[in-house]
Image: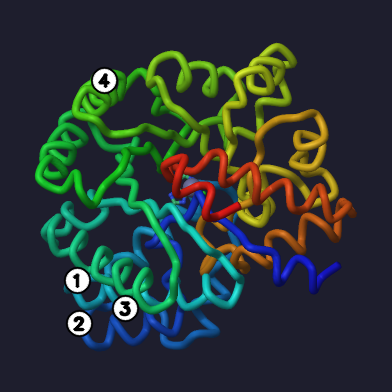
Amino acid sequence: MNEFIQSLPKVELHLHIEGTLEPELMLKLAKRNGIKIPFNSVEEIRDAYNFQDLQSFLDIYFQGADVLIHEQDFFELTWAYLLRCKEDNVLHTEIFFDPQAHTERGVLFDTVLYGIHRALEKGRDELGISSKLIMCFLRHLDEESAFNTLLKAQSHKDKIIGVGLDSTEIGNPASKFERVFKQAIEQGFLTVAHAGEEGPAQNINEALNLLQITRIDHGVRCSEDASLVKQLIHERTPLTVCPLSNIKLKVFDCMEQHNIVLLLRQGVCVTINSDDPAYFGGYMTDNFLAVNDAHPMSKTEIAQFTFNAIEASFVSPSEQEKLR
Ligand code: ES4
Ligand code: ZN
């Protein structure tokens, strides 16, 4: 079964490009850019990756992102991720980036975007991996900062397909970004949002109702609301679930407790994704293997995750046919 999983064609829909920064590249860029980080070795960095919750991870994640300064840094980061995609037979990937994590430090929006975009074009041409780019607003920052970020994306609608919402869920409700999302939709961006990762099922309802999103990132706490699960099944609202992330951030105590396979068998359009693989200890294949180890599945069930991801992707219907 492990060979079947390894060779299964995959589609990734929930991946923060800053979360693919491996310790080796972090050290290399810190040195190259003269950025001080509180680590001297790969081992020291990996030892620091013991998280209590989402916030303790985010603190380390933003600190790591500080080593990214030049367009070339963003290019190398993205290219390294695409090479991992190739190993895992990921045919298509929809990538988040957090422009505010960089513009807040004085790095230009265009520096970030062009570095990532150049790698994605090379990935398409040389590796045959298709991709879409989704810009996330940091929910711990204010509405004005999100509006400013949306303004910067205006001239890049050819490169950015949608907007999302990430960072600290608790204390930063969807309502804070209702007006930003309304404007983004009016401008033609597709919309997604993290909801029901650490926060309760009600946050999923709010994201759906206030932000008009077309898929939910994480959303695993939907199980606390039976009528919500019914609605998700009926409307085929996709959930981009990140199993290893959920264990590392203690959303579930262990993989045996994870609800992803239950949701799949209930008929929810769930997908498997890696979130921040450099920090959570695994890329796409690792996530599939970890789920199947704890919840043995049939080949048909495992393949259903890829069919769900194709259906949930932002690829046009004619392009979708090529992935099937
Ligand atoms: C994130 Cl796992 C997770 N949750 C919310 N925001 C994030 N940004 C990067 N990873
Ligand atoms: Zn995420």
Residue located beneath label 4 in the image = 182
Position of 303 with respect to 22 (left or right) is right
Q: Tell me if mark 4 has few (under 14), some (14-19) or many (20+) residues whose alpha carbon lies within 10 angstroms of its own.
A: some
**What amino acid type is highlighted by mark number 3?**
Glu
Callout 2–callout 1 Cβ contact below 8 Å: yes
**What amino acid type is highlighted by mark number 2?**
Asn
Residue located beneath label 1 in the image = 69
Residue located beneath label 3 in the image = 76
Foreground label between 3 and 2? 3
Mark-to-mark CA distance, 4 and 3: 34 Å
Q: Is mark 1 within 8 Å of ligand 1?
A: no
Foreground label between 4 and 1? 4
Q: Which label's residue is closer to the chain start, 3 or 2? A: 2
**What amino acid type is highlighted by mark number 1?**
Ile
Q: Which label's residue is closer to the chain start, 4 or 3? A: 3
29 and 161: which is toward the camera? 161
Q: Is mark 2 within 8 Å of ligand 1?
A: no
Q: Which label's residue is closer to the chain start, 2 or 1? A: 2
Q: Position of residue 39 (x, y in %)?
A: 41, 80
Where is residue 123, by image quadrant?
A: bottom left
Residue located beneath label 2 in the image = 33
Secondary structure at numbered mark 1: loop
Q: Position of residue 124 (x, y in %)?
A: 37, 69
Name above or below for residue 240 compared with residue 191.
Answer: below
**What amino acid type is highlighted by mark number 4?**
Lys
Q: Tell me if mark 2 has few (under 14), some (14-19) or many (20+) residues whose alpha carbon lies within 10 angstroms of its own.
A: some
Position of 25 with respect to 2 (left or right) is left
Q: From the image, which quarter does the N terminus lie in?
A: bottom right
Where is residue 78, by image quadrant?
A: bottom left
